[in-house]
Image: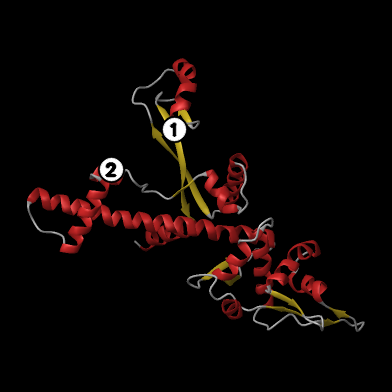
Amino acid sequence: MKQRVFISNAEYRAMNTLKNIDSDRLIAMFCHLRAAKDGRRRFAPIKTQQNKTVKHYRLLIKETNLSRASLDKYLPILIELGFVKLDSDGGVTLRGYNASIEALRGTVRIAKRLVVAIEDKYAHTALNVAYIRVHTNIQKQKNKIDKKETQKLLIKQSLLEDKFKCSILSKSSREAADALIKKWGSYDKFISSYCEETILSLNAYGRIKTNDKERILETKNRGAYFKKKLAKKQLIISYERAEQVLDTPMIYSDYISSRWDLRQYYGDSVFRDWETGLIYRRLSSGVFLKVMIDKKQNLKNNE
């Protein structure tokens, strides 16, 4: 079983908000250092048989198997942020979980504990670090969907009350349902106001991966690569979604001649289904998180 370490959301945020640096690798290095410390107060300097002292960077290379190049790139940043301290005797002190929460008090509204799975290489751990943001994004969507489902049930029950002149809802629930109808105008308009699936576009994947403001094409390309890495590691399962835009099938020659007009109206994602001849436009792909998949499998196994 892979080793897992805890990192607070305040620590995560302090490193993830830095610009012009691969923050995922920075956080991954910090997690590897915390995992290697393994409950010790610090990394103590080591005396060799030749009575020489292995200290600081050489000490961390020996204790963690991190490369010198990686340490040269990211350790100074961790030192500047106060997460790591090079001791005068050659040892290295890593700020603990509780100490970080105290030092970073006020930087987050609610302190939360995040779990990062440690891989053999910290560059691979960086993908697990980035996955935390994907998980957060999808969980927020799921919470909104759950809230909308509750609201949908309220509206349905209020419509039943009106139809059969009966009492189903409490007074407060009825007022909430009436307020929703007033806001959206009708049940159908309310249903069309949200998506019942958790989704992420390539641009969304790209924005999650990097904090830098890039051109749309660069963000989209970065998002496609990030999505591919997540899927390859089975952290997510992604599926394609499409919406039919025309009811009448088109023969291929008609589609080719009118493709420009279709794209002008429906966007560049318009395509023709080869079997039916119907015209669709691609939507943001749906996504399941690994934790959601595991829960479904466990439920199935317990049936």
Nearer to us of marks 2 and 1 is 2
Q: In x, y percent, where is residue 289?
A: 48, 55
Q: Which residue is mark 1?
A: 281
Q: Secondary structure at mark 2?
A: helix
Q: CA distance from mark 2 to mark 1?
A: 21 Å
Q: Which residue is mark 2?
A: 189
Mark count: 2
Q: Quadrant of the N terminus?
A: bottom right
Mark 1 residue type: Arg
Q: In x, y percent, where is residue 21?
A: 69, 57
Left or right: 157, with 46 as reference point: left
Residue extending furthest toward the right: 50
Q: Quadrant of the C terminus?
A: bottom left
At 47% across and 43% down in the image, what residue appears? 285
At 26% across and 42% down in the image, what residue appears? 188
Q: Secondary structure at mark 1?
A: strand
